[in-house]
């Protein structure tokens, strides 16, 4: 698969998600005060150089992208996006006929070295709340657990780990079919916004869970479910989104994992449509 085009698709997926109004998350329509969309765009550009480099292993591409972004921006702008999108790009670079099978093969055969590089990348980015977790599989604690073991343990409370453990089932079986359904009926940008809300309704957001705990994550999920009931896909839902967005941003709550899942869904959707690859 053409790496230059794949790089462009990844970058456009990051920008497209940034243009959507996602309550609590940063967008050009509603900013998080301490964050800057130009830095999000720059992070997407920087990371794309590593993610499409065929000479780098999965762990090398993730570590290189995260370290470069962290050094250049002095903040974690795209760790989740990098970790989720890197395996997808590696698989589609090979132009495989059965990408889900190839993805599973890639994930279950992550080498010890690559696994450690990915864990080191997480340590470098220091995602919010990561040091609060003291249980089994704590990446800051020396242990004899393998990378797949850590993903398996993490899958119970972290949706990115769950993607690695379950072969991205949440995206392939939930996100993509929903996006396909929506974009046939409404504008793509509205479809992305509703996709994000549905990810927020489907399970507790990992970023909120790590930073604020289960009680707050459950409250946010409940409010998202109430919002979903009020949404009318053929109408303007901006006022409803704005109300929820104000509540989340005033509480400094950012459903960052749901945004990461949204970007990854967009990436796979674009690759599938452009290259006409059955999933």
Image: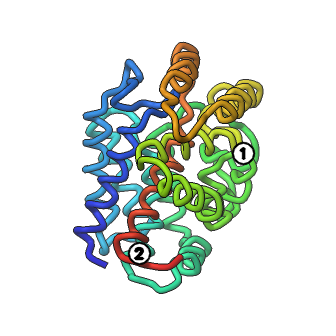
Q: Earlier in the sequence, mark 2 or mark 1?
A: 2
Q: Is residue 203 left or right of residue 127?
A: right
Q: In front here: 190 or 74?
A: 190
Asked whether residue 215 appears in the rendered view, the answer is yes
At horizontal 74% and vertical 30% (from top left) the residue drawn is: 222
Quadrant position of the N terminus in the picture:
bottom left
Q: Position of residue 254 (x, y in %)?
A: 54, 29
Q: Is residue 140 above or below residue 147?
A: above
* Residue found at the far left of this picture: 4
Secondary structure of the residue carrying numbered label 1 = loop
Secondary structure of the residue carrying numbered label 2 = helix
**The image quarter in which residue 232 lies:** top right
Q: Position of residue 239 (x, y in %)?
A: 51, 21
Q: Is residue 160 left or right of residue 4?
A: right
At horizontal 38% and vertical 24% (from top left) the residue drawn is: 31
Q: Position of residue 272 (x, y in %)?
A: 43, 71
Give the CA separation, mark 2 to mark 1. Answer: 28 Å
* Residue found at the far front of this picture: 234
Asked whether residue 80 appears in the rendered view, the answer is no
Q: Which residue is label 2 attached to? A: 92
At horizontal 26% and vertical 76% (from top left) the residue drawn is: 2
Classify 10 Å Cα crowding around label 2: few (below 14), some (14-19), many (20 and above): many
* Residue found at the far top of this picture: 250
Q: In front here: 18 or 142?
A: 18
* Residue found at the far bottom of this picture: 97
Q: Is residue 78 above or below residue 171?
A: above
Q: Which residue is label 1 attached to? A: 157
**The image quarter in which residue 203 lies:** top right
């Amino acid at each position: 698969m053409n790496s230059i085009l794949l790089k462009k698709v990844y970058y456009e997926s990051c920008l497209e998600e940034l243009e959507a109004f996602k309550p609590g998350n940063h967008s050009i329509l509603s900013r998080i005060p301490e964050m800057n969309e130009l830095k999000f765009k720059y992070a997407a550009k920087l990371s794309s150089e590593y993610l499409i480099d065929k000479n780098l292993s999965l762990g090398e591409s993730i570590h290189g992208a995260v370290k470069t972004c962290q050094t250049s921006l002095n903040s974690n702008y795209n760790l989740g996006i990098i970790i989720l999108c890197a395996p997808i790009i590696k698989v589609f670079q090979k132009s495989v006929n059965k990408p889900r099978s190839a993805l599973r093969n890639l994930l279950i055969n992550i080498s010890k070295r690559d696994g450690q590089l990915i864990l080191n990348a997480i340590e470098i980015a220091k995602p919010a709340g990561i040091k609060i977790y003291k249980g089994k599989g704590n990446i800051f604690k020396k242990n004899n657990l393998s990378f797949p073991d850590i993903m398996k343990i993490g899958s119970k409370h972290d949706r990115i780990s769950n993607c690695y453990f379950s072969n991205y089932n949440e995206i392939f079986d939930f996100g993509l079919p929903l996006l396909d359904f929506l974009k046939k009926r409404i504008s793509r940008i509205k479809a992305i916004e509703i996709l994000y809300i549905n990810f927020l309704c489907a399970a507790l957001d990992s970023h909120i869970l790590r930073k604020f705990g289960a009680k707050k994550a459950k409250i946010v999920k409940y409010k998202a479910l109430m919002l979903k009931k009020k949404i009318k896909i053929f109408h303007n839902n901006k006022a409803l989104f704005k109300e929820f967005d104000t509540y989340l941003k005033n509480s400094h709550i950012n459903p960052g994992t749901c945004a990461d899942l949204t970007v990854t869904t967009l990436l796979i959707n674009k690759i599938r449509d452009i290259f006409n690859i059955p999933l």
